[in-house]
Image (cartoon, coloured by chain):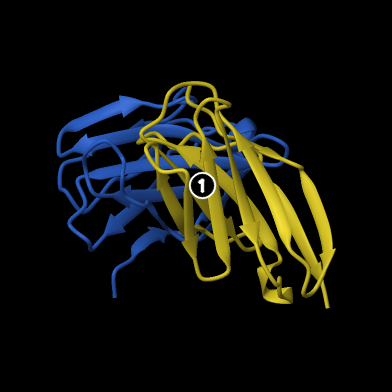
Amino acid sequence: EAQVTQNPRYLITVTGKKLTVTCSQNMNHEYMSWYRQDPGLGLRQIYYSMNVEVTDKGDVPEGYKVSRKEKRNFPLILESPSPNQTSLYFCASRLPGQGNYEQFFGPGTRLTVL
Amino acid sequence: SQQGEEDPQALSIQEGENATMNCSYKTSINNLQWYRQNSGRGLVHLILIRSNEREKHSGRLRVTLDTSKKSSSLLITASRAADTASYFCGANSKLTFGKGITLSVRP
């Protein structure tokens, strides 16, 4: 089954404790991205990747890192999480090009930073 | 940024009625896409319309695009309780979304 998976689905952590949220897709998509969703603010893109070893900042990249060493994986790294990073996070992927393709979203990771 | 802004923010209708949702964007686009999100879950793609198309249908969905007004509308006909969800529009490759439209369909 074609899908985007994220782990963990739920995470409660404390300020400053480094964490990684994994994202994996099995559709051989070149393009992957991360979004965060907050009440009243909608979905905002954090980082995206056009292909392996190619990443770029989205609209809200501060406090986040990503890497793209393999096509299928696109982990989101929070080196020193803070409470304002409490949010619902989504990973997504699609075929490359000018974007005339649908994005496939993962199920989301609900992160709480205390 | 190429942002989709949805309107209205909330919509409540009776089952069987039609639901019309609007989206505006700021810059030129190659395509515009609509997505649905059930509470707390990931977004699911509904329909994509290219910039050279004016109208597109998919089942009970009808989407229009007016590039001169930089706007799109999504019509859900004969709504069902299962259509209750949030709806988002996004444009082009970056798919910057707005805050979404919360649709409630009353049985």
Rendered location of residue B42, percent (x, y):
51, 58
Asked if B16 appears above or below B40 in the picture, the reply is below
Rendered location of residue A96, percent (x, y):
21, 42
Asked if A63 appears above or below B82 in the picture, the reply is above
Residue A64 location, quadrant: top left
Rendered location of residue A65, percent (x, y):
36, 31
Q: Pick whichever, A43 or B83, lies toward us.
A: B83
Please give left or right for residue A48 compared with residue B49 in the image. Answer: left
Please give left or right for residue A22 compared with residue B75 in the image. Answer: left
Asked if B12 appears above or below B89 in the picture, the reply is below
Examine the rendering and report whether any part of residue A52 can be seen. yes
Q: Which residue appears at 73% of the width and 37% of the height? A: A40
In the rendered structure, the colour chosen for chain A is blue
- Count the numbered circles shown: 1
Which quadrant is the C terminus of chain A positioned in?
top right
Q: Which residue is mark 1?
A: A89
Q: Which residue appears at 34% of the width and 53% of the height? A: A23
Q: Pick whichever, B84 or A33, lies toward us.
A: B84
Examine the rendering and report whether any part of residue B100 can be seen. no
Q: Pick whichever, B20 or A7, lies toward us.
A: B20
Q: Which residue appears at 73% of the width and 59% of the height? A: B19
Please give left or right for residue B7 compared with residue B106 in the image. Answer: left
